[in-house]
Image (cartoon, helix red, strand yellow):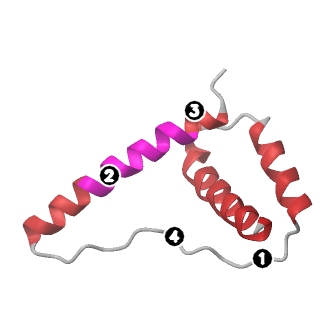
């Protein structure tokens, strides 16, 4: 069984490769580099709610077609959790 952490690590490396390729394509075309980082939205989730969602996602199974949306969601949740912890 593939773990969520492994999926996220592989997906992150794929995104990095994609960004490098797109950067090269933009340089060849003469286009400026475009920031592809999705903005993090503010929410009213508490630390406890974020921890619950992250632990539920960790123990779940996902289809390949859901990996992109899952990655972006987990990234946002982790950033919010980290921001609230400080």
> Where is residue 75 shown, x and y percent of the image?
62, 57
Q: Position of residue 69 (x, y in %)?
A: 60, 55
Q: In what element is the residue under mark 4?
A: loop
Pointer 4: what residue? 38
Q: Marks 4 and 3, Cα distance to the nearest angstrom?
A: 21 Å
In primary-sequence order, the first of circles 1 and 4 is: 4
Answer yes or no: do the residues labelled 4 and 3 have beta carbons within 8 Å? Answer: no
Whichever of labels 1 and 2 marks the residue nearer the N terminus, that label is: 2
For label 3, the residue is: 6
Q: Which residues are magenta?
A: 8-20
Q: Quadrant of residue 64?
A: top right
Mark whose residue sits in front, 3 or 2: 3
Q: Is residue 67 magenta?
A: no
The furthest residue to the right: 48
Quickly name the residue at label 2: 18
Badge 1 local density, few (<14 within 10 Å), some, or many (20+)?
A: few
Asked whether disc 3 touches disc 2, contact meaning CB atoms under 8 Å apart, the reply is: no
Q: Which residue is mark 1?
A: 43
Which quadrant would residue 72 be assigned to in this image?
bottom right
Q: Gap between marks 3 and 1, in whole Å?
A: 27 Å
Among the two numbered marks 3 and 2 on one chain, the one whose residue lies closer to the N terminus: 3
The answer to whether mark 4 and mark 2 are in CB contact below 8 A is no
**Vertical arrangement, residue 54 with respect to residue 25, above or below:** above
- Label 3 vs label 2: CA separation? 18 Å
Query: x, y (%) of residue 2?
Result: 63, 25
User: Which image quarter is the N terminus in?
Assistant: top right
């Amino acid at each position: 069984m593939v773990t969520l952490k492994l999926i996220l690590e592989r997906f992150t490396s794929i995104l990095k490769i994609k960004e490098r390729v797109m950067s090269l394509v933009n340089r060849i075309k003469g286009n400026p580099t475009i920031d592809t980082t999705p903005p993090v939205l503010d929410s009213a989730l508490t630390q406890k709610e974020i921890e619950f969602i992250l632990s539920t996602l960790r123990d779940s199974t996902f289809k390949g077609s859901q990996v992109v949306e899952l990655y972006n969601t987990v990234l946002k949740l982790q950033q919010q959790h980290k921001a609230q912890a400080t």
